[in-house]
Image (cartoon, rainbow, N blue to C red):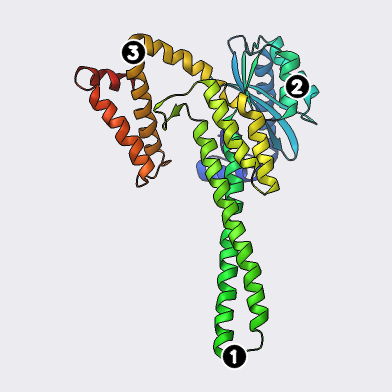
Amino acid sequence: AIVALRILSPTSIRAIEDLLPILYPSVHSPSYGIIQQILIEAENNAAIFNKKSDLSQIHVGALDEMFSQGDPVLAGIDLEIGYLFLLSMEDHRGGDDWEKTLVQGKNQGLALEIVVKDAARGISDGVNRVFSNAEQRDDCFHAHYEMGKRRLVLERRAYGAINQELEIQNKLKKAQQGGFDSLEKLEASLKIVSQRCICAIKTHDLFEQAMREAQEAMEFVDLQAGQIRTALEMQTAIEVAAKKIKAINDKKCQKIGKYISNRASGLALYMNDIAKQFNILTERYGAEVVQIAAVIWRLVDDLKKGRRRWSRSQDKKHLIGAYHQFLQLAGKQADTIFAVV
């Protein structure tokens, strides 16, 4: 229970000390020092186990950096089964630190062929030195996260500008009714704030539209064309959206646009693996059936995850188009399409 509370919660030692009498009311609770001793023993046993583990079956891994009390923790997860094959606290997170950690894994048989990572330079340098032939893919999470974070800031800024404009409009209205001398000053302020409000709303709308395009470009199904994207098509679509983000008159938007543009090829690499799997389905069921099945799957998945507002005419058009395609291949083909989905 002590180890589980520490690892899975995670819970502080002092909190564990308080929880044990509640979990085990009839058992004498160990002291703070005993709990700490048990945890240190567990950590040492885990370290010994990790250093002896056979990592030769791990070929696809995700690498990332976390922080514990300000110190970087280098981590790696096997994407096939979710096994944590790498966990090391270091003083820094540069290429040398990643190289040292990955070499330890390589000595235990680690043979990474595909690495999923963010834009951290240290990870890339470490992988290049230890697994030079590994394909380095960029994860979509950080791209989505950075865009979503900026969109929220721009949204709040726009609403703030709207509220400020309304506030001055109300003051101006009261001043006009009372015949105060501050009318000219309020009118001048309103003109400045209104212009600022227009710019804030425009910046938000431009960014959100480009962000939606970038997010859509990262999806394996192109709903507009009603087909599965190739890696090159995905990369091109991401670059087009990134260019629009870079064109926005906002430094942080431009920085995000540059980040996505630089990562476009890495973000699209996963499509090569998906294409191989789709080719197997195509050989068995035919290209048309697989395309329609992919579109239907994408629409249903979007609906389940709340990524789509079905009241929008464009979304209706996509759904109706896929439905008509489905009807054309209905009858004997219907069961086949659903089998592929």
Residue 208 image point, x, y percent: 54, 46
Quadrant assignment, res 126 = top right
Horizontal arrangement in the rendering, residue 341 relative to residue 143 (left or right): left
Which residue is located at x 69 percent, y 21 percent?
47
Q: Quadrant of the N terminus?
A: top right
- Give the crowd class for mark 1: few <14, some 14-19, many >=20 residues within 10 Å: few
Q: Which residue is mark 3?
A: 286
Secondary-structure class at tag 3: loop
Secondary-structure class at tag 2: helix
Q: Residue furthest left?
A: 331
Residue 79 image point, x, y percent: 55, 21
- For marks 2 and 3 on the same chain, the one whose residue lies earlier in the sequence: 2
Foreground of the two, 164 or 106: 164
Residue 65 image point, x, y percent: 68, 31
Q: Which mark is residue 179?
A: 1
Which residue is located at x 67 percent, y 35 percent?
259
Q: Which residue is mark 2?
A: 125
- For marks 2 and 1 on the same chain, the one whose residue lies earlier in the sequence: 2
Q: Label 3, label 1: how many angstroms apart (C-alpha)?
A: 78 Å
Q: Please state the total of marks drawn on the protein image.
A: 3
- For marks 3 and 1 on the same chain, the one whose residue lies earlier in the sequence: 1
Q: Amino acid at mark 2?
A: Asp
Quadrant assignment, res 62 = top right
Secondary-structure class at tag 1: loop
Residue 328 image point, x, y percent: 24, 24
